[in-house]
Image (cartoon, rainbow, N blue to C red):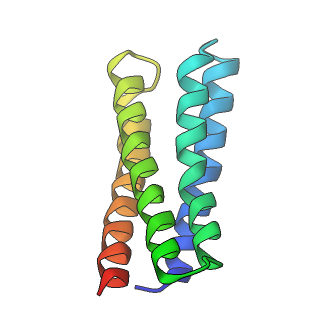
Amino acid sequence: MSKGLLKTKSYAFAIRIVKLSQYLQSEKKEFVLSKQVLRSGTAIGALQREAEFGQSKADFISKMSISLKEANETEFWLCLLKDTGYIEQNLFDSLCSDCKELIAMLVATVKTAKK
């Protein structure tokens, strides 16, 4: 797996999360959860960008691990949004699938970096 693929997928996911947040605020008038999912969902890629220029291998691993934590948190917010009726099942399935893919990629990246 290349870092470029992870970078591309996390950026595309961040765009989807921004659009989700805009939808939640404009159509559902939901402002608290939308900001939570926006923060964690966009942090995934932002932390990877920080990791690219980490000061050390340990710094790289730390940033990527935090990115993984943000991805896990984003999955929580997506589940909560679905279970409270703010997003439909099909939108949830699509977003959650992308989020789980990022989680798997981040787990692999952190494991590889720790070797």
Give the side of residue 106 with respect to residue 41, left or right. left
Tell how many labels.
Answer: 0
Depth check: give the residue in front, 52 or 32: 52
Q: Where residue 70 appears, x then y in whole percent?
A: 46, 48
Find residue 26 and report its image quarter: top right
Give the side of residue 27 with respect to residue 61, left or right. right
Residue projecting furthest to the top:
29
Depth check: give the residue in front, 34 or 23: 34
Compared with 89, 113 (above or below) is below
User: Measuring 29% from the left and 87% from the top, which residue is drawn there?
Assistant: 115
User: Measuring 54% from the left and 62% from the top, which residue is drawn there?
Assistant: 10
Find residue 93 and report its image quarter: top left
In the picture, the quarter occupied by the N terminus is bottom left
Compared with 68, 8 (above or below) is below
Compared with 16, 98 (above or below) is below
Q: Where residue 83 appears, x then y in whole percent?
A: 32, 21
User: Measuring 53% from the left and 42% from the top, which residue is drawn there?
Assistant: 40
Compared with 103, 79 (above or below) is above
Q: Where residue 65 appears, x then y in whole percent?
A: 41, 62
Q: Where residue 107 appears, x then y in whole percent?
A: 31, 68
User: Measuring 54% from the left and 45% from the top, which residue is drawn there?
Assistant: 41
